[in-house]
Image (tube, helix red, strand yellow):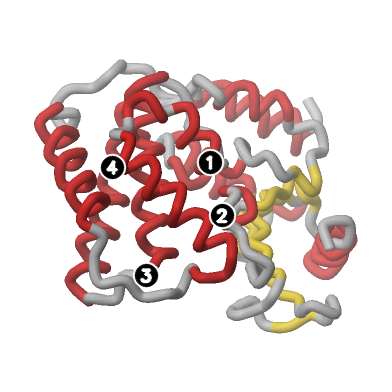
């Protein structure tokens, strides 16, 4: 399956008259939480020719596509292989604000197309605003958990979604660098900071998810629920909404130079 995805991406290039800078896996497979039933979640960044950009016609900033298990092209929603791409200008704008979701794309361990984007990846391994990234991950985890519990529709997959984001926030706080895309790697590296009973329960949830029980509904998991409350309270008291870890933002000049070299060929 993985060997076929680059071919499908080449088809997307041809259909849309674009060039893909890089394409990666960005869902449960990248997080190492996939089961046999898991679909593929491919994200890519594309660009056009200089002539196309210099136009009064509005160009699409996003391209979506989907394929079934037999590689027939279908609607993206619910497809076995879901593909979503951002135009490089949209993508760089998000990068410039240290958007963790888009930074995560260039940190994936599963790469389908690379086209020499290593310079970009190397830059963002440390060149991002740690405070903004921490706050995004913390707030996304807290917001998701609150939403799920209010609707009373928590299942193992949703619990792990909140845990993954929380671990990401802790990782940025501890190491001042991008979290691994793999939740398993983050969990293992943070083991010393996680209570033993919580660590064991998270591992148990991971095993259940991988074995195909991700959608199993659970009323509550006290040891995890208490851990969420403690960490959210701890992070809130840090006061990072008012105080930054550092004042370093993304180097916009680097992004501009990258664009010029890529599109203008300077």
Circle 1 is placed at which residue position?
A: 184
User: Are discs 2 and 4 less than 8 Å apart at CB?
Assistant: no
Give the mark nearer the N terminus: 3 vs 1: 3
Coordinates of residue 57 in the picture (x, y in percent): 64, 65
The part of the image, by quadrant, that contains residue 154 is bottom left
User: Are discs 3 and 1 less than 8 Å apart at CB?
Assistant: no
Q: Secondary structure at mark 3?
A: loop
Circle 2 is placed at which residue position?
A: 33
Q: Is residue 122 above or below residue 9?
A: above
Give the mark nearer the N terminus: 1 vs 4: 4
User: Are discs 1 and 2 less than 8 Å apart at CB?
Assistant: yes
Return the residue nearer the eye: 4 or 154: 154
Coordinates of residue 250 in the picture (x, y in percent): 46, 25
Q: Is residue 152 above or below residue 163?
A: below
Foreground tag (4 vs 3): 3
Left or right: residue 19 versus residue 29 is right
Mark 1, Cα crowd under 10 Å, few <14 / some 14-19 / many 20+, is: some
Give the mark nearer the N terminus: 1 vs 2: 2
User: Are discs 1 and 4 less than 8 Å apart at CB?
Assistant: no
Circle 4 is placed at which residue position?
A: 138
Give the mark nearer the N terminus: 4 vs 3: 4
Circle 3 is placed at which residue position?
A: 155
């Amino acid at each position: 399956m993985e060997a076929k995805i680059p071919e499908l991406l080449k088809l997307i290039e041809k259909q849309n008259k674009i060039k893909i800078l890089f394409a990666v896996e960005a869902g449960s497979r990248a997080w190492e939480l996939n089961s046999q039933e898991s679909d593929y979640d491919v994200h890519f960044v594309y660009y056009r020719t200089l002539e196309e950009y210099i136009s009064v016609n509005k160009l699409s900033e996003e391209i979506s596509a989907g394929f079934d298990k037999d590689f027939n092209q279908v609607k993206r929603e619910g497809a076995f292989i879901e593909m979503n791409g951002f135009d490089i200008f949209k993508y760089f704008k998000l990068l410039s604000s240290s958007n963790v979701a888009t930074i995560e794309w260039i940190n994936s361990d599963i790469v389908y197309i690379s086209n020499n984007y290593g310079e970009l990846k190397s830059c963002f391994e440390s060149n991002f605003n740690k405070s903004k990234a921490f706050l995004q991950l913390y707030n996304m985890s807290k917001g998701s958990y609150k939403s799920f519990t209010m609707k009373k529709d928590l299942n193992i997959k949703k619990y792990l979604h909140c845990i993954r984001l929380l671990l990401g926030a802790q990782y940025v706080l501890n190491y001042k660098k991008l979290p691994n895309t793999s939740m398993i790697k983050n969990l293992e590296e943070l083991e010393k900071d996680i209570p033993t009973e919580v660590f064991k329960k998270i591992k148990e949830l991971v095993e259940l998810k991988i074995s195909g029980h991700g959608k199993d509904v659970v009323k509550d998991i006290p040891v995890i629920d208490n851990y969420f409350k403690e960490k959210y309270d701890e992070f809130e008291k840090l006061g990072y909404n008012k105080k930054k870890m550092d004042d370093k933002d993304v180097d916009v000049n680097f992004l501009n130079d990258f664009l010029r070299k890529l599109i203008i060929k300077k």
